[in-house]
Image: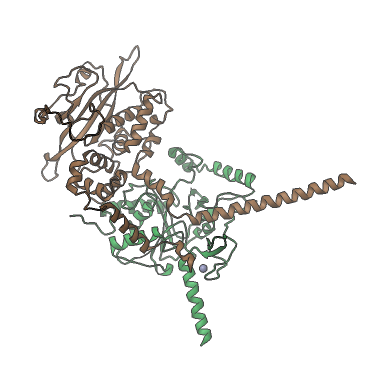
């Protein structure tokens, strides 16, 4: 009695989402309204990203889903299994093997290619929301490129803290025209968005907005010439793979507060360990 | 390695689901679908309203699956609804043709067709029903058969033009559909009504209550509150004429509110409208109060109260959206938190260095003084 279409949504709805995505690609960074549907996962769990993925996924795709950089976090596991169940497509944890990567809060360490699409889950698409809660007013600011207040906010941070205090979701200027939320990725990931060969799609289900950054589009993190943008990471080394350049999770390993660092990108970390083992074997022979 | 356990996984999810299923069944068989349908009618009505889908059986199923959590049940219904193709739009229901079970008007002592209480708890004593006190002279419920049609109790006001005509829908014709387009502002009246109709009952109730306490007062009177079955009809394109496809129970509330007018424009009472699927007095009345409050700007009244702000009310009345976003805070946020940690440590380090430097300067100054 209860049967579901390929990728859950009916074809008409998926077509509507793809139309909105085309508009989004045509105006990089611009928030396009769309008729967001209720998905079987709650708002805030990535319904926007799930709808985008559902609209673009085909039989031959290979999907990777990460949350906090990891494939094995509960939410990532739940979304990946949802798509396996609703589409029958293969999921993978390997960044290089995926054609679609749906993510919450991170961009993989390994550079993405032209053959890939990265789908971001976005809680709050409006980068000005803390400054202007009324969305129609914010929309006017975008139309007029009136972003002075955002610079004032950054300036206030600098006078107060000596630096910009946004550690994640640091606003970016897309194609020199539209101020955009990169979603709550750490500032460390912002530079990866710039001129990325992969198509970047963003879905905000609850706020009913989609936006996109086409391949090779300039994406600049907002800053000042005398206070340049500063992507931070914990000053540490991955306890597993020894990486000194990846974004790290801080893990407390005992009751005395002993800290260790691990790569947040589990696939990147596992890949490096494999590579090291392979090299050690070759060296031994 | 111990710290791998900080990340969850497939097994953890499966175990959580199994535990929940076990808890739901309890010691016995649990409640059957039939028992739920017959015993929890008002809960089912609310789930259908907030789930925006009229299907009592599915709503009962949702209620059971959600362990009685109404918002979760509405969510189940909504996400199922999202997968269903839209075949045809129903024609507007005609509530004047309702088979009325309940109909009261607070503005007239008696109305044409009479005041009819119907199956209400309004005049019950809120005492636990022990099952021993059934009055021997209980009336035969059959004596209170539904009646139809029953003219609107407010007709007399309209006839005298003391009541405004039904407010215009706005620029949209046919009315915009909230489920196929995103909520946007300014929102037309049909969109506002659609958003309120599926809005959270608690939120609507509290907002309505706030208008009664001075935050956007509308001087409301219940012109009429009616509940009963109405026919739903559609015009299939291949037939070209209307056919009835079923009946649904709805509750409709027409509020009569403070009048507008001036020396030149004859004063008229204004309207607030509420409609809910199922038997839902509280919901329909709250909706009518909030709907009227949202018209403050249009009617040139003073604004500034929460219930009068369409963007505030409509953006936050959907409990599926609200619960999702509030509860999503329990998902992992450790990457963002890590970046905050790095920033706060860096700022603290800077502050410490600055303090140390200042201290050194002061010592130097003190030293200079001693010379
Ligand atoms: Zn590592």
Comparing B18 with B52, the one in front is: B18
Residue B99 rendering spot, x and y as whole percentages: 13, 31
Q: Is residue A279 left or right of residue B25?
A: right
Task: Relative to B96, say whether A145 is above or below.
Answer: below
**Residue at screen point 67% across, 52% down:** B350
Residue B300 seen in the figure: yes
**Rendering coords of residue B290 (x, y %):** 34, 30
Q: Observer-nearest residue: B202 or A230?
A: B202
Q: Between residue A272 and residue A171, name the one nearer to us.
A: A272
- Which color has been applied to chain B in this rendered view? brown
In the image, taking residue A218 as reference, residue A206 lies left or right, namely left
Do we see residue A110 in this rendering? no
Q: Position of residue B182 (x, y in %)?
A: 34, 43
Tell me the green chain. Answer: A
Number of numbered discs? 0
**Residue shown at 48% from the left, 53% from the top:** A184
Residue sitting at the far front = B132
Direction from residue B99 to residue B274 in the image, left or right: right
Location of residue B7 (image quadrant): bottom left
Of residues B321 and B367, the one drawn nearer to the viewer in this rendering: B367
Residue farthest right in this picture: B371
Point out the residue furthest to the bottom here.
A285
In this figure, which colouring scheme has been used for the structure?
Answer: by chain
Residue B337: give x, y in percent of width and height: 52, 54
Q: Residue at x 31, y 44 (%)?
A: B71
Outermost residue on the top side: it is B263
The answer to whether B312 is drawn above or below residue B341 in the figure is above
């Amino acid at each position: 009695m209860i049967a579901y279409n390929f990728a859950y949504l009916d074809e008409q709805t998926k077509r509507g989402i793809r139309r909105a995505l085309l508009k989004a690609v045509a105006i990089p960074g611009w928030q396009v309204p769309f008729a967001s549907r209720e998905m079987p996962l709650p708002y805030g769990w990535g319904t926007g990203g799930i709808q985008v993925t559902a609209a673009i996924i085909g039989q031959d795709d290979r999907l990777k889903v990460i949350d906090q950089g990891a494939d094995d976090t509960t939410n990532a596991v739940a979304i990946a299994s949802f798509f396996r169940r609703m589409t029958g497509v293969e999921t993978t944890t390997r960044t290089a093997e995926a054609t679609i990567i749906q993510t919450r809060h991170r961009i993989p360490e390994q550079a993405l290619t032209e053959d890939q699409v990265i789908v971001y889950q976005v809680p709050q698409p409006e980068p000005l929301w803390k400054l202007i809660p009324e969305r129609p007013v914010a929309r006017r600011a975008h139309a007029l490129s009136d972003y002075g207040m955002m610079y004032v906010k950054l300036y206030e941070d600098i006078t107060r803290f000596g630096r910009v205090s946004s550690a994640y979701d640091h606003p970016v200027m897309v194609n020199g025209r539209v101020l955009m939320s990169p979603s709550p990725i750490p500032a460390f990931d912002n530079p990866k968005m710039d001129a990325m060969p992969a198509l970047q799609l963003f879905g905000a289900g609850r706020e009913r907005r989609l936006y996109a950054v086409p391949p090779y589009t300039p994406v600049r993190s907002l800053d000042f010439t005398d206070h340049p943008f500063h992507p931070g990471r914990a000053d540490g080394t991955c306890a597993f793979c020894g990486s000194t350049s990846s974004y790290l999770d801080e893990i407390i390993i005992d009751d005395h507060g002993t800290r260790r660092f691990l790569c947040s990108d589990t696939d990147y970390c596992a890949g490096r360990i494999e590579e090291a083992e392979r090299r050690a074997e070759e060296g031994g022979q | 390695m111990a710290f791998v356990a900080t990340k969850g996984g497939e097994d953890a999810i499966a175990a959580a689901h199994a535990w929940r299923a076990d808890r739901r069944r309890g010691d016995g068989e649990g409640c059957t679908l039939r028992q739920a349908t017959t015993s929890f009618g008002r809960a089912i009505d609310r789930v259908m309203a907030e789930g925006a889908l009229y299907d009592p059986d599915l709503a009962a199923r949702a209620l059971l699956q959600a362990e009685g959590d109404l918002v979760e049940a509405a969510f189940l219904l909504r996400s199922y609804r999202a997968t269903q193709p839209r075949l045809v739009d129903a024609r507007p229901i005609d509530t004047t043709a309702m088979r009325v079970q309940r109909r009261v008007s607070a503005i007239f002592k008696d109305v044409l067709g009479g005041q009819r209480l119907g199956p209400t708890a309004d005049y019950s004593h809120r005492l636990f029903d022990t099952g021993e006190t059934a009055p021997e002279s209980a009336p035969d419920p059959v004596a209170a058969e539904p009646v139809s049609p029953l003219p609107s109790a407010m007709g007399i006001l309209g006839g005298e033009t003391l009541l405004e005509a039904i407010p215009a829908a706005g620029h949209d014709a046919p009315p915009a559909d909230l489920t196929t387009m995103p909520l946007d502002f300014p929102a037309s009246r049909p969109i506002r009504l659609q958003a309120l109709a599926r809005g959270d009952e608690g939120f609507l109730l509290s907002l309505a209550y706030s208008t009664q306490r001075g935050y956007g007062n509308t001087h409301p009177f219940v012109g009429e509150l009616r509940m009963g079955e109405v026919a739903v009809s559609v015009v299939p394109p291949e037939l070209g004429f209307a056919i009835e496809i079923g009946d649904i129970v709805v509750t409709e509330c027409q509020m009569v509110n403070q009048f507008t007018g001036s020396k030149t424009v004859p004063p008229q009472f204004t309207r607030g409208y509420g409609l809910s699927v199922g038997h839902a007095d509280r919901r329909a009345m709250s909706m009518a109060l909030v709907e009227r409050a949202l018209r403050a700007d249009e009617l040139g009244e003073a604004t500034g109260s929460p219930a009068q702000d369409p963007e505030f009310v409509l953006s936050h009345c959907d409990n599926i959206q609200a619960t999702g976003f509030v509860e999503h805070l329990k998902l992992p946020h450790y990457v963002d938190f890590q970046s905050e940690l790095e920033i706060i440590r860096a700022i603290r380090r800077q502050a410490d260095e600055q303090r140390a430097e200042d201290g050194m300067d002061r010592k130097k100054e003190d030293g200079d003084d001693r010379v």
